[in-house]
Image (cartoon, rainbow, N blue to C red):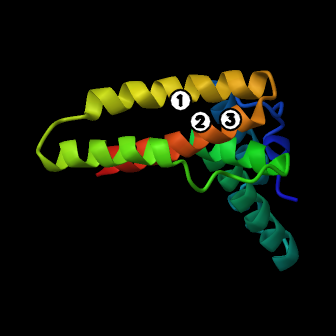
Amino acid sequence: MFDPFAILNINKTFSIDLMMVEKCYFEAQKQIHPDRFINASSDIKKDAVQRSSEVNKAYHILKDPLLRATFLLENEDIKLLSNEPLFLAEVMAWNERQGAGEDLSEELKCEKELLVKELAASFECKDYERARTALYKLTYVQKVMKQ
């Protein structure tokens, strides 16, 4: 199974140092980047491309709190939330306010920061139900932010 934490040799936890993730990413790429194998056999080149692709994917997942939380929950065989009616009412209100021309960027940024902190706390104490809810909300906050 693909494990971004193992690929970049980082402890499997939600709260990670993003600078360390970047350092581990560049270190891994130095070792396995396909350009290092330009004169190697086609099998070795193919393997280098595959491994480099996995390192890129791992980096992409670990640097994004939404993707990192999703991986961690799925790794624990926790099903992601698909519906939270009370929160959807809040999302609809945000959409209406944005549709009326209101700038919600600061409010949504604060909400995102709170949800990332909630995810960190939830994973720290292994409260996966709380993490599921925070992840669900963060998904929608980010969608509204992109609109």
**Among all residues in the image, which is located at the extreme left?**
101
Mark 2 and mark 3 residues within 8 Å of each other at the beta carbon: yes
Looking at the picture, which amino acid does disc 3 mark?
Ala
At horizontal 76% and vertical 36% (from top left) the residue drawn is 128
Q: Looking at the rendering, which quadrant does residue 40 occupy?
A: bottom right
What amino acid is at disc 1? Leu
Q: Residues within 10 Å of mark 3 (few under 14, many from 20)?
A: many
Mark 2: which amino acid?
A: Ala
Mark carried by residue 134: 2
x, y percent for residue 87: 46, 42
Q: Are discs 2 and 1 less than 8 Å apart at CB?
A: yes
Q: Between residues 39 and 3, which one lies in front from this camera angle?
A: 3
Residue 144: x, y in percent? 35, 47
Q: CA distance from mark 2 to mark 3?
A: 5 Å
For label 1, the SS is helix
| Residue in the picture at 42% in, 42% down | 141
List x then y, in percent, for residue 65: 59, 37
**Which badge, 2 or 1, is on the more N-terminal residue?**
1
Label placed on residue 115: 1
Q: Residue at x 85, y 43 (%)?
A: 6
Q: Is residue 37 left or right of residue 109?
A: right
- Circles 1 and 3: CB distance less than 8 Å? no
Q: Is residue 64 above or below residue 118?
A: below
Indicate left or right for 95 with 12 as reference.
left
Q: Which residue is mark 3?
A: 131
Q: Could one spot residue 15 in this view of the protein?
A: no
Crowding near the residue tagged with mark 1, few <14, some 14–19, many ≥20 C-alpha atoms within 10 Å: many
- Seen from the viewer's position, the closer of residues 92 and 98 is 92
